[in-house]
Amino acid sequence: MDYSQKISERQWNLPDKGELESRREATYIDDIIQKDHIQRKLLEQLDGVRTVFDGGAGSGRFSILLAKQGCRVTHFDISQPMIDKARELAAKAGVLDRIDFVKGALEDLSAYRDRQFDLVMSFDAPISYTYPNQNRVIGELVRIAGKKIMISVSSRLGSLPYLANPIQKNQFILDENDDDPFVRWCVANRERMIDGFAFSKQNAEKLLADGLMGGEEEIAQYEQGGAPWCITYAFLPDELEGILSGYGVKNIRLSGPGAYGRTIPREILIRIMKNPEQKRDFLDFCYRYDSNPYVCGMGKDNLLAVGEKD
Ligand SMILES: C[S@@+](CC[C@H](N)C(=O)[O-])C[C@H]1O[C@@H](n2cnc3c(N)ncnc32)[C@H](O)[C@@H]1O
């Protein structure tokens, strides 16, 4: 088994993962924008869709949404805590009978038939965590899709600005008093991150060239019993489009959820989020702007692709 898969298995099976994941939209503004964008795109795709495969489905943000729309969903994930949380939320939503929960790794989809599902989806970067198998995994997801495929992967152009901004996540914290552990960490370390920061052109050039975040250091941490963040492969827009079309996907549309929102300072974002009317208009406009293919590379850190099978 590759290190990426072993690291993902350990990282995503940490006991609090499901709980933290399910609170993201209550905590971070960029997650609100991204979820809203994916949700809108998904709801536009449901014509003729009855069966759905959600690969790396997490705590059920989108699998439960589609079960509520009447679809039969296979919720597939490498993490038991995620599946447990999703099962709890699906029960609350009254859709347990429409979801099959499967624990498994995207690296092996051999249990599924060609074109088994009307819609195959995988959101918020599970594919990027399967490095070095990411292209083959996309091929397998396309193989089991009958009509439509929708994936969001880590975006290389969207991730590069992080290398010049160690406090970018602070921009999106909704409430600085939130007890979420990462919020506490971002608030406590803000000044230290700024003081200790030096821009490394070499690191930026490397990420631009190879798309790889993580590597030897993560492997060493894993070998010492640690649970480092996953080794992540970040795609370029034309690269992702080329891979999908190479597997026969047609009518591919790319977007970059978060591109508009990331240009706005935190004080302004908070004002918008606190006013329901402004928030609704803002999310409407983010959706339009972030769907423009010319900004798709600049989405926050996800690159979204929608396409069709013949
Ligand atoms: C950032 S979360 C996104 C969850 C969900 N798709 C969403 O958008 O809410 C990434 C998910 O991918 C899962 N994952 C990571 N590597 C995986 C792999 N190799 N196979 C299957 N699932 C994986 C994790 O357990 C986690 O639930």
Image (cartoon, rainbow, N blue to C red):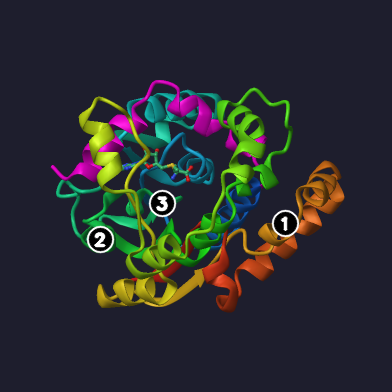
Residue linked to disc 1: 283
Residue linked to disc 2: 115
Residue linked to disc 3: 125
Q: Are marks 2 and 3 in contact (CB under 8 Å)?
A: no
Displayed quadrant of residue 194: top right
Q: Secondary structure at mark 1?
A: helix
For the record, the magenta segment spans 1-29
* Residue displayed at 53% across by 41% down: 68
* Residue displayed at 58% across by 79% down: 294
Mark 3 sits near ligand 1, with its Cβ under 8 Å away? yes
Three-letter amino acid code at the position of disc 1: Leu
- Mark 2 or 3 closer to N-term? 2
Displayed quadrant of residue 133: bottom left
The answer to whether 242 appears left or right of 67 in the picture is left
Image x and y of residue 286, in percent: 69, 62
Image x and y of residue 213, in percent: 37, 53
Three-letter amino acid code at the position of disc 2: Arg
Displayed quadrant of residue 175: top right
Report if residue 104 is visible in the image: no
The answer to whether 141 appears left or right of 281 in the picture is left
Q: Secondary structure at mark 3?
A: loop
Q: Quadrant of the C terminus?
A: bottom left
- Which numbered circle lies on residue 291? none
Examine the rendered structure and indicate whether residue 276 appears above or below residue 135. above
Mark 2 → mark 3, Cα distance in angstroms = 22 Å
Three-letter amino acid code at the position of disc 3: Ala
